[in-house]
Amino acid sequence: MPLPSEPCSQVPGLGMGWMGAQVPGWPEAASHTGFLHILQPVVAWVWGTMAQALGEDLVQTSEGQDDSSSLGSDSELSGPGPYRQADRYGFIGGSSAEPGPGHPPADLIRQREMKWVEMTSHWEKTMSRRYKKVKMQCRKGIPSALRARCWPLLCGAHVCQQNSPGTYQELAKAPGDPQWMETINRDLHRQFPLHEMFVSPQGHGQQGLLQVLKAYTLYRPEQGYCQAQGPVAAVLLMHLPPEVSALDPNPEEAFWCLVQICEVYLPGYYGPHMEAVQLDAEVFTALLRRLLPRVHKHLQQVGVGPLLYLPEWFLCLFARSLPFPTVLRVWDAFLSEGVKVLFRVGLTLVRLALGTTEQRLACPGLLETLGALRAIPPTQLQEEVFMSQVHSVALSEQDLQREIRVQLARLPESTSGPPPRPQARLPGAQAIFEAQQLAGVRGGTRPEVPQIVVQPPEEPRPPRRKPQTRGKTFHGLLTRPRGPPLEGPSRSHRGSTSFLDTRF
C-alpha cells in the first residue's frame, strides 16, 4: 500500500485536530499543535489503519473499553451513560471501586500516610538529610489522600509559587492568543471524557484545564501549546483541585507543576522543535540494543523505530498508555527520580510485549508489532507487579547520562532547529531542591533549610622538621657551639644530657 501524500484530514481514521491542517514535514515544517508531528507521514498511515486508535474519529463504547484505565482519552464521547457510578479515581463506570490484587492493606496505607505527613511537615529537613527515605516511599506509592500535598513539593512547584506571587492570577485574567485558544478549546473534551471532573464542557474540570493551558502559552509564548500537555495538565488537576468555587477556578498549583515538568523534568519536549524527543529516541534505541538485543533486532527487522511509539509514552507521561492506578505510581516515581523512570517504564513495556520468542513470531510485520505494544494484558500492568519490574531495570542515572552524551555527539550538525540541551534537565526531586536552595542563596533570600553548624577541625600541627645535614660533616655536628637550653620540660627518655653526648 502506498503511503498517503494528502493532508492528515483526508487520511482515514486521523482527524484534523490531531495532527494539524496538513501532513508535517520532517522536521522543518512541523506543526506544534500535535505532539506526533515530529514523525514522518508514515505515522498517519500506520495509526489510521490501526482501528482508528488516534484522532477525532475514535468513538469507543464503554463496553469495549477498559474502564480502570485512562486509555482512549481522545474519545469524543458526549458523556457517560445514566445510572453509572464513579470509581475511587473518579472514572464513571470504572472498575477501580475497590483496591485490586496486591494492593497494600488499609493499616499499611495509614502507616505510609503518617510517614508522609511527618516528612512533608519538615520538608526542607527531610530533603536535606533523608532523601533516600523519600525516594523509597515514592517507589512504594504516595497515598492517594496526600498526592495533592506531595507532588508540588517533589517537583518544586511550591517554591515557584512562593517566588512568583500573583503571576498566575495575571496570566489567568489576560486574554489568550486566539490561535492557541482555538486549538485548546478543540482539545478540551478529549482529556479523560469518562472522568466525572471533565464530563461537562462548563464544569470546573474543563474550565480549569483551559485556564492552565492558556496561562502556559502566555507564560512561555515562544513555546506555545502542545497537545501532549493536555493529558498531563488534566492528571494534575485531578489531584490538585482548586479550593475556590467552580465559577472561578484557580488551579495555580497545577499550573506551576506543569511549568516544572515542561521546563525542568523534560526541557525541549514541548517546544516547537521537540529536539529532546528525537535525542531520547536515539538513547532509547541504544538502551534496547544493550538490554534487550533480541527485541531490538526484531524491531529493526519489521521497521518499527522508537518515534512510532515513544513520543506518546514520554510526552504524556504514560497517562494514555497505562491503567490509571499504574499511571499514578509512575508519576510518583517520576517526580522523585526524573526521566530515568520513563526509560525504565518504556523498556519494561517493550519487554512485556515482545520479550519472548513466541511473542515476536506472532508479530511478523510493522502493524502487528505496534499492535502488540498497545495490547499488553491489563493483568501484567497491575501497579504493584508492574512497578516492581520497572524498578528492577538495570538502568542507573549514570548509565543514562553516559548514553545521552554518546548520542549527543553523534547528532549531525546539519539538524535544523536548536540543539538538544540535556544538561538543562534535572534528575529528580533532590536535584531540583538543591538547585532552588542554591538559587535562593544567590538571590539574597534566606533558604528555608535549617542551617547545620559543623565545627571546623582543629588546625593540624606542623610536622617536626628534620635538621638540615646536607653538606655538613658529622664532626661539625659534634663540635658546633651549643645554644641556651630550650624552655619547657625535656623528654624523659633523654634525661638531662643530649643523645650525642651520651653515645659519644
Image (tube, helix red, strand yellow):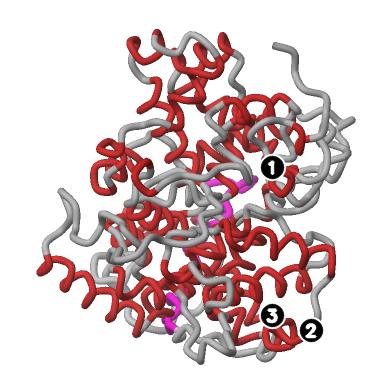
Q: Residue 109 carries which label?
A: none
Q: Give the range drawn in magenta.
A: 452-477
- Vertical placement of 460 versus 167: above or below? above
Task: Please state if 283 lies on the left or on the right of 376 as rendered.
Answer: right
Residue 110 visible in image: yes
Secondary structure beneath label 2: loop
**Sequence order check: which comes first, mark 1 or mark 3?**
1
Residue 213 location, quadrant: bottom right
- Looking at the image, is 233 positioned above or below residue 286? below
Tag 1's secondary structure?
loop
Q: Residue 96 location in percent, x, y?
A: 26, 57
State left or right for residue 154 relative to residue 92.
right
Disc 3 to disc 2, C-alpha distance? 32 Å
Residue ID at (84%, 70%): 177
Mark positioned earlier in the residue sequence (3 or 2)? 2
Q: Residues within 10 Å of mark 3 (few under 14, many from 20)?
A: few
Q: Give the crowd class for mark 1: few <14, some 14-19, many >=20 residues within 10 Å.
A: many
Q: Which of marks 1 and 2 is nearer the N terminus?
A: 1
Check disc 3 and report the residue beneath it.
442
Give the overall secondary structure of the magenta segment.
loop
Q: Which mark is residue 15?
A: 1
Q: Tell me the amino acid under the disc marked 1.
A: Gly
Residue 253 x/y as whole percent: 54, 78
Q: In which quarter of the image is residue 390?
A: top left
298 and 204: which one is in front? 204
Question: Would you name the residue on which mark 2 appears?
Answer: 174
Amino acid type at mark 2:
Ala
Residue 498 can be seen in this image = no
Tag nearer the camera, 1 or 3: 1
470 in magenta: yes
Whether residue 279 is in magenta: the answer is no
